[in-house]
Image (cartoon, rainbow, N blue to C red):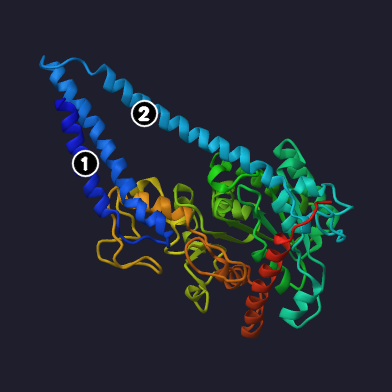
Amino acid sequence: MLPAVLGTAAGVSIGVVVAAGSRGPTLVPWPAKVRAAFPFVVGAVAGAAVALPVGLGAALALAVIGRGSWPVKPVAVGLGVLGAGVAAGALGRGQAAKKLTPQGRDLDPAYAKAPLNPLVSGSAQSAVSMTELGREGARFVGSVTSADTILAVTGLAPVAEPVRVFIGVDAAVTVEQRVGLAMAELRRTGAFDRGSLLIQAPAGSGYANSTPVDVLEILTRGDAASVAIGYGLLPSFLSLGKVPIAAQTQKLLLDAITEELATRAKGPRLLLYGESLGAKVQEAAVPGGPIDLDHYNIAAALWVGTPGGEVADRFHALCQQESITVDRPEEIPVPLPTPRPRVWFLEHDGDPVVRFRPELLANRPAWLPLDGRRGRNIPDSMTWRPGITYCQALIDTLFATNVKPGDFQSLGHDYRADLGAVATAAYDLAADAATAARLETQLRTLEKAKAELIAQAGPVT
């Protein structure tokens, strides 16, 4: 009885303190129900975490001094609860993967037909079919920039037709085979004859952001090609274990492109782009930083919203002398430093995906210093509390992106409002103020039109 009383008292006391301390501000807005429940859930978890060991410790102490029996049942119950929690988490992830994988293969009716344009994957001339592209690949190649869009933004006629290559994870069994298909597509479409070739690392689901490619295609007046190779069909939070194979995919693709260009007198500028998990993947593919970028002759790299952790830290350190980190376009220095930055990190101060890391549990992060300084969109009253800030940031990541088509926000993990200007600067593209303004308008128009197409219902043929 006494161990139970001591454990309960300790658990309740800690639970109340933790619940009270968890009501502070967060990096992004939460749904009202989540915000209301959060203190109680965190307090209950903290209380249980304290109650069990205190109760068991008291029972063991009494047994040692001969005033109680060995707490076999409480220990067994505690281990059982722990095991059940681990099993439930694994089962939940497994069920989510089972449900979401088919969705990654389902094509939107509006993007299901093979494109008539021979310069994109999935066309009649392509080595891969639309079904092999998957949902995200079909959307990517189906969004290639039109001549009318180029004319509307630049006021000039296109000088070439853009090339878009995408190889879905279902197109081949091995990484080597997928890279081989990508190279065949790049050669078939004449991608190596374009002025720029953008290599994008997609997210876990295969999602390849069209916006930076749109920017490149528009401002080069079509003299651009892009390529992405998928490595999965699941959202990034279920694809963390695929980072090594995804990085291998990127490295083999870079190796193959470098070998191909060595046989040509002239080749395109090579550009890198990765967003969220894709940024982490691409950074892991060139671990030597500037040394690897030199080896592959990379003209510029833009990495957006890299998930917090060692990969981003190491790259920031490696690329210090030739990199730049901005929270938004207004932070781009004018004029740019000399030599021109080759590696660009776009990271919101208040992006929980960037800020969340295990160290938050027990260490004050640099973005919540004691002197009260706070970055953009980090609440002035937000402070670090052991354990609590970690839990808050974890929930923040779930609501880090709240996308409304065409309504670009520079908030949390939503970088749409920043990509036009930052991609223009990172890739050294020419755009005067009027052109930049038309570009921003067009990017929003393109996203709205794409969302409308995706929303269309109809049979997949």
Name the residue: 77% across, 68% down.
223
**Is residue 451 placed above or below 277 in the rendered structure?**
below
Residue 365 on image: x %, y %: 33, 55
431 lies left or right of 73: right
**Is residue 234 placed above or below 326 in the rendered structure?**
above
Name the residue: 28% across, 37% down.
48
Q: Circle 1: is it few (<14), some (14-19), or many (20+) Cα within 10 Å?
A: some
Image quadrant holding the N terminus, namely top left
Residue 19 on image: x %, y %: 27, 50
309 lies left or right of 169: left
Give the spatial CA distance, label 2 vs label 1. 19 Å
Specify the amino acid type for callout 1.
Val
Nearest the eye: 131 or 420: 131
Name the quadrant containing residue 373: bottom left
Name the residue: 16% across, 31% down.
5
Specify the amino acid type for callout 2.
Val
Query: Which residue extends farthest bottom?
Result: 434
Residue 191 on image: x %, y %: 79, 59
334 lies left or right of 393: right
Q: Which mark is residue 81?
A: 2
Nearest the eye: 213 or 6: 6
Of callouts 2 and 1, which one flags the residue occurring earlier in the amino acid sequence?
Answer: 1
Nearest the eye: 421 or 459: 459
Circle 1 residue: 12
Secondary structure under the numbered disc 1 in the rendered image: helix
